[in-house]
């Protein structure tokens, strides 16, 4: 066979693999299969939307009831747990405090920074992958991925290990933003490959990787440069890289973002939707070609992951004055004037993601105001204040929504047209990581421990 024909065949197989994966996700086959096996391979679960269907998760628990095991974790990190084949994987950063000389250098570096009093710094960090046994909670192994000397300061609400890793075909891909991305063989703990895509986060890393077929998609929206990259899952070699559209804002702090891609198929077209400063953009995950874009204005530092209900994508504009936008997914090119169905501007989160169910979309603001909107027109159905502050994204399961607060409280409310609180559960520590699910059990990470919560 001629080399040219072989190249075309390889390209076709790669495109077909991405198409098959997205089709499974869109159709629910892959989601249902993963949940049946007890797997949770990426941020917000198999479909990336925090929806586990009819799984009957625990309703009530505390430090003294409903806990199958509780395991102390080394280091610090806000990454969510991922699960496959009876093993839980997380990332963490072990921080070595700065010396007196380093502290002085950090103070000089932060001079003039309006957020200097909200920044933390370390003298050095070890970035780790942690393996925990699902059945027992035993910490099985710690894999050192990177050591970073004199890392830049990060925001006190962030960690050096906030992006959630992704599991695919026996490999764990861990992304630490500018500090590096690494692939681990989960059977051996060996590091298969490492890569580094340097950008200036200003406040630390945030966006999680997503696998589309045989590539891993990385959001690289720094203050200095903004681009999306796709690396080969097996080798870590670049497959494509595309710059974001031009941004009007000249302030570097307002050009960055931290959004995790959402992968789905609509009308036979594969899309990876990735919000950023000023723009919502949908890409072809096989090539990086832009499908559509929406100019959402002055939003920046986007953190929430989009959600999709089969017709519209629901996206948050980020910091500044957070808004929730509903965009039809069948457009091409700049659809800012043609495909935006509605906007909501009150009590929209800058950090946690939405969940969508039965013609309703739910959000919780950073300050703890939960809202339910009609997906067809954006009209508010109900609004209620829930105690606490919120960074973790909510979970939808069997007619219930789970909201996890920074103060360690999980409030469970009904997925319904009227607000109904079903339970309030308190654990020690902070909930910064979004929850994970294995079978009928919740896997919750606090700032110090990992919990498996379920019926005995």
Image: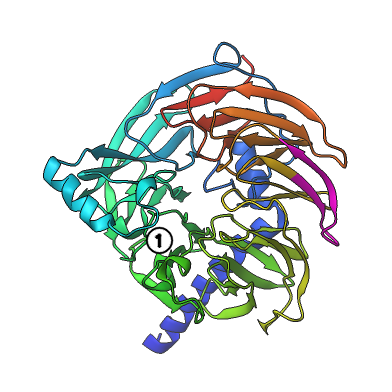
Can you give x and y, in whole percent of width and height, for residue 35 in the image? 63, 40
Number of residues whose C-alpha sits closer than 10 Å to that of mark 1, classed few (under 14), some (14–19) or many (20 or more): many
Residue at image coords 44%, 77%: 250
Label 1 element class: loop
- Check if residue 250 falls in the magenta segment: no
Residue 412: which quarter of the image? top right
Residue 166, percent from left and from top:
46, 50
Q: Residue furthest left?
A: 101
Residue 161 lies, with reference to residue 133, above or below; the image says below
Image position, residue 40 (x, y; %) = 55, 42
Residue 346: x and y, percent?
72, 54
Q: From this viewpoint, is residue 140 visible?
A: yes
Which residues are drawn in magenta? 371-385
Q: In the shown orientation, is residue 254 left or right of residue 237?
A: right
State the residue in front, 65 or 257: 257
**Secondary structure mainly formed by the magenta segment:** strand
Query: Image quadrant of residue 39?
Result: top right
Q: Nearer the viewer, residue 24 or 361?
A: 361
Which residue is found at the position 63% from the left and 70% from the top?
270
Q: Image quarter for residue 441?
A: top right
* In the rendered image, the vertical position of residue 249 relative to residue 429, given as above or below: below
Q: According to the image, label 1 marks what residue? A: 233
- Kindly identify the residue that appears in the image at 67 percent across and 66 percent down: 265
Closer to the camera, 143 or 199? 199
> Is residue 69 rendered to the left or right of residue 37?
left
| Residue 384 belongs to magenta span | yes
């Amino acid at each position: 066979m001629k080399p040219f024909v072989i190249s075309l065949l390889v390209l076709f197989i790669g495109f077909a693999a991405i198409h098959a994966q997205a089709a499974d996700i869109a159709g629910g086959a892959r989601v249902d299969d993963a949940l049946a096996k007890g797997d949770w391979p990426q941020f917000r679960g198999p479909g990336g939307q925090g929806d586990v269907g009819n799984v009957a998760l625990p309703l009530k628990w505390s430090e003294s009831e409903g806990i199958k095991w509780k395991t102390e974790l080394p280091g610090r990190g806000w990454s969510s747990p991922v699960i496959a084949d009876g093993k839980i994987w997380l990332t963490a950063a072990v921080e070595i405090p700065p010396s007196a000389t380093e502290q002085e250098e950090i103070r000089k570096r932060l001079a003039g920074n309006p957020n200097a009093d909200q920044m933390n710094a370390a003298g050095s960090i070890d970035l780790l992958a942690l393996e925990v046994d699902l059945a027992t909670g035993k910490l099985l192994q710690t894999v050192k991925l990177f050591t970073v000397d004199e890392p830049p300061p990060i925001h006190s609400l962030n960690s050096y290990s906030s992006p959630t890793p992704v599991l695919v075909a026996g490999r764990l891909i861990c992304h630490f933003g500018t500090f590096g991305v690494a692939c681990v063989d989960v059977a051996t703990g060996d590091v298969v490959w490492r890569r580094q895509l340097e950008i200036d986060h200003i406040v630390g890393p945030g966006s999680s990787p997503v696998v589309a077929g045989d590539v891993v998609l990385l959001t690289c929206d720094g203050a200095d440069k903004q681009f999306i990259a796709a690396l080969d899952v097996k080798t870590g070699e670049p497959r494509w890289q595309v710059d974001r559209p031009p941004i009007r804002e000249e302030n570097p702090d307002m050009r960055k973002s931290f959004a995790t891609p959402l992968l789905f198929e609509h009308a036979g077209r594969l899309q990876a939707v990735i919000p950023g400063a000023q723009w919502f953009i949908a890409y072809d995950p096989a090539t990086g070609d832009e499908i559509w874009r929406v100019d959402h204005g002055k939003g920046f530092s986007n953190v929430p992951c989009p959600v999709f209900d089969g017709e519209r994508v629901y996206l948050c504009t980020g910091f500044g004055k957070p808004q929730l936008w509903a965009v039809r997914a069948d457009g091409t090119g700049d659809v800012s004037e043609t495909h935006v169905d509605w906007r909501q501007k009150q009590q929209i989160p800058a950090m946690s993601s939405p969940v969508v169910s039965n013609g309703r979309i739910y959000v919780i603001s950073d300050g703890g105001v939960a809202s339910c909107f009609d997906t067809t027109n954006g009209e508010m159905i109900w609004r209620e204040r829930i105690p606490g502050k919120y960074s973790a994204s909510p979970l939808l399961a069997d007619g219930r929504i789970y909201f996890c607060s920074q103060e360690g409280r999980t409030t469970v409310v009904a997925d319904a047209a009227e607000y109904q609180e079903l339970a309030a559960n308190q654990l020690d520590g902070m909930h910064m990581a979004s929850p994970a699910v294995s079978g009928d059990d919740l896997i919750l990470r606090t700032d110090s421990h990992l919990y498996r919560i379920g019926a005995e």
